Image (cartoon, rainbow, N blue to C red):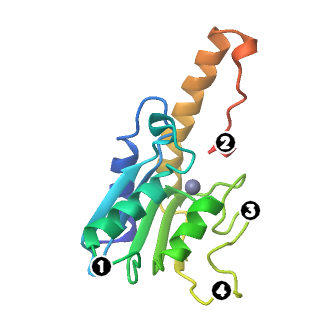
Amino acid sequence: MTDTDLIRLALAAAAEAGPRDVPIGAVVLDHDGTELARAANAREELGDPTAHAEILALRAAAKVRGDGWRLEGATLVVTVEPCTMCAGALVMARVARVVFGAWEPKTGAVGSLWDVVRDRRLTHRPEVRGGVLADECAAPLEAFFRAERAATAKSGPESRRGLTLGDD
Ligand code: ZN
């Protein structure tokens, strides 16, 4: 499977996000390319600040592999550049490779705002490929925030939450 194919899997996962959740999807594959787990961002649905797609997928993947918390040799694929929490988690999980779609200049921690995963002070540094199908990955987010803005505009300025891409 090419990285483009992998991102398409993550896009399919993103499409499973609940109606209130920012549509971001992640997939974890084993070293041989077997899919271990996939997840969509479920922060609103679960009322959990840590329920980003990457975290949910990493947790599920470790459970499926069933041999502890290490995901050595695994690849994490996600539609949007991971935040600091998720970048930290994937380093902690010892993921070998990260592939992501859209860059996230406001909060991205895999090369945009920070580069948490390739800090030279770390002993484990995953390989990174970003910007794969970037426009296709950004499209569902843009549509989501456009709809959110339209909804808040309709319900009046006092309920405006000033949502931007950077909120996630
Ligand atoms: Zn995150």
Q: Which of pointers 1 and 4 lies earlier in the amino acid sequence? A: 1
Per the image, the residue denoted by label 1 is 67
Number of the front mark, 3 or 4: 4
Q: Position of residue 10 (x, y in %)?
A: 38, 55
Q: Which of pointers 1 and 2 lies earlier in the amino acid sequence? A: 1
- Tell whether circle 3 marks a residue whose Cβ is less than 8 angstroms from ligand 1: no
Mark 4, secondary structure of its residue: loop
Q: Which mark is residue 122?
A: 4
- Graded by Cα atoms within 10 Å as few (under 14), some (14 to 19) or many (20 or more), the crowding at tag 3 reads some
* Residue beneath the point at 27% across and 73% down: 66
Per the image, the residue denoted by label 2 is 167
Q: Position of residue 29 (x, y in %)?
A: 32, 70
Q: Are marks 3 and 4 in contact (CB under 8 Å)?
A: no
Q: CA distance from mark 1 to mark 4?
A: 24 Å
Per the image, the residue denoted by label 3 is 113
Q: CA distance from mark 3 to mark 1?
A: 34 Å
Is residue 5 found left or right of 164 in the rendered image? Answer: left
Residue 157 visible from this viewpoint = yes
Number of the front mark, 1 or 2: 1
**Amino acid beneath label 4:** Leu
Q: Which of pointers 3 and 4 lies earlier in the amino acid sequence? A: 3
Q: Position of residue 73 (x, y in %)?
A: 38, 83
Residue 11 visible from this viewpoint = no
Q: CA distance from mark 2 to mark 4?
A: 27 Å
